[in-house]
Each structure stands twice: as C-alpha cells, then as structure tokens.
Amino acid sequence: MLGNYLHYGLLVALAIALVVAAATDWRRRQIDNWLNAGIALTAPLYWWASGLDLWPGVALQLAVGFGAFVVFAALFALKWMGGGDVKLLTALALWIEPTWFLKLLIVMALVGGVLTIVMGAWHIARRQRDRVAIPYGVAIAAAGLWVLGTHYLPAAQGAIAG
C-alpha cells in the first residue's frame, strides 16, 4: 500500500516539476539544471515504486533515455533545440514507458507547432526584428502532463482505491 502512495506521490511531484519547467521556460527561456537533474535522479525511485524489473524494464528505460539524449543532443548541436529542452526530454524518457514516450513526442510536436505559430504571429504583429525565442519547454511540459493525466495518474488512482 505504501508503494502505491509513493508511486502516486512521485507522479504528482513530476507533474509539479513539469509546471515549474514550463513556467521558468516561459519567463526566462531557461529550464534550470537542478530541476532536470531532480527529475532524472528520482526516476530510479519511481522505477522501484512501480515494481519495474531490472530486465527488461529498467534497461529499456535507460536505453530510451540514452536514445533520446543522442537524438536531441544532435538537434541541439544543429541549434534546433535548447540545452534545457534536451535535458528535460532525456529526464522524461527515464520516467515514461517507450510507447507513451513516443506519444509524448507527437503531442509535444503538435503543441510546439501551435506555440510557434502563435508566438511568431505575435512577434510579427509587434513588428519585432530580433529572432523569436520559442519556449519549447512549455510544449514538452504540456505533453508530459497530458501523458501523466491520460495514462499514469488514472492507473495510480485505481491502484490506491483498489
């Protein structure tokens, strides 16, 4: 029973961390390293609370995290993505099941596209000449919250009630 509460509490903590990441990225165009590190470093506690087996469960989470880092670090090297965004996605990859992580990426791309269009239009309407800075952490956080709300939290609530 304690494991169920811990599982649920960690998911709530992740949701709060995502809201903080979105807020700081919106205000400062920066996602703090301490926040990304906290998300990544609590993943093993979440694996334990979830009852994830070392093989293949934890190994798969680590592989997805490493793969996410490689792909998004390449996008960072091309200056297509910010460093905080890379770290946040890598940290989330440690938490989210691989199929749901793919869904997270799709939702992130859709939200990010809308965000880019809206901010670009606002930038043009204000006749600003500097380069528009899109707080993509907002899209990442929105997609993460969507995954938590649709997949993880209902399952956790059922486990606590049952």
Image (cartoon, helix red, strand yellow):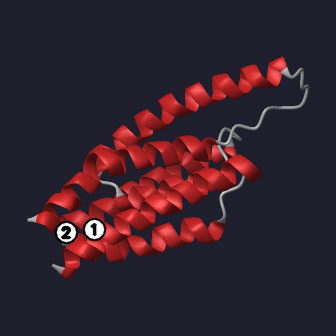
Q: Nearer the viewer, residue 6 or 29?
A: 6
Residue that appears at 52% across and 62% down: 17
Q: Give the secondary structure at mark 1.
A: helix
What numbered label is drawn on residue 55? 2
Quadrant holding the N terminus: bottom left
Q: Position of residue 152 (x, y in %)?
A: 27, 54
- Which residue is identified by label 1? 58
The reply to whether dot 2 and dot 1 touch (C-beta < 8 Å) is yes
Q: How many marks?
A: 2
Q: Position of residue 14 (x, y in %)?
A: 44, 63
The image shows residue 108, relative to residue 92, as above or below, that is: above
Q: Position of residue 162 (x, y in %)?
A: 8, 65
The image shows residue 157, relative to residue 140, as above or below, that is: below
Along the horizontal axis of the image, is 125 left or right of 96? right
Q: Nearer the viewer, residue 100 or 126?
A: 126
Q: Is residue 101 visible?
A: no
Name which residue type carries label 2.
Trp
Residue furthest left in the image: 162
The image shows residue 64, relative to residue 53, as above or below, that is: above
